[in-house]
Amino acid sequence: MAQRIIDGVLSALAGLVSVLLSWPYWRDFEYWPESPAMWWVYIAAGYLLAVYVFYVFLGSLRTLFLHDEQARVPASGRDGLAREERP
């Protein structure tokens, strides 16, 4: 449960950074839309999508490292068992 909270907080912070990097102020308002309401919809949707993508990425990254760790441990364990069984 603690890992999910950590992933959620990291994803929220990464999403916030993504939104701040895409803010039109940094680009001299080149991409400012016609309607301010649509701009807020765009920001909210982008933030939610960024949080989701970062959350899934962190989960996939953890699974990748877990599989790598599991692949290493049994290999050394199997070699030890094979050596013990030999007469």
Image: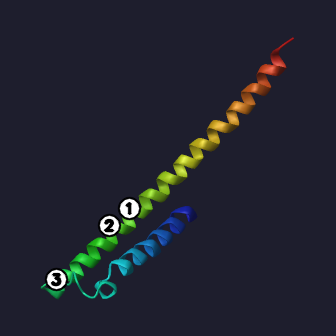
Quarter residue 38 falls in: bottom left
User: What residue type is disc 1 on?
Assistant: Val
Mark 1 and mark 3 lie on one chain; the one further toward the N terminus is: 3
Q: Which of 83 and 25 is in front in this view?
A: 25
Q: Distance between the residues labelled 1 and 3?
A: 25 Å
Label 2 Cα neighbours within 10 Å, binned few <14 / some 14-19 / many ≥20:
few
Q: In which quarter of the image is residue 29?
A: bottom left
Dot placed on the residue nearer the N-terminal end, 2 or 3: 3
- Mark 1 lies on a secondary structure that is helix
Residue linked to disc 1? 53
Side of 24 where 8 appears, left or right? right
Look at the numbered disc 3 and give the secondary structure of its residue: loop
- Judged from the image, the secondary structure of the residue bearing numbered disc 2 is helix
Residue 49, label in figure: 2
Q: Furthest residue to the right?
A: 87
Image quadrant where residue 70 sits? top right
Per the model, the C-alpha gap separating discs 2 and 3 is: 20 Å
Circle 3 residues within 10 Å: few <14, some 14–19, many ≥20: few
Q: Which amino acid does label 2 sit on?
A: Leu
Residue 3, percent from left and from top: 56, 62
Residue visible at 81% across and 16% down? Answer: 85
Above-or-below relation of 11 to 30? above
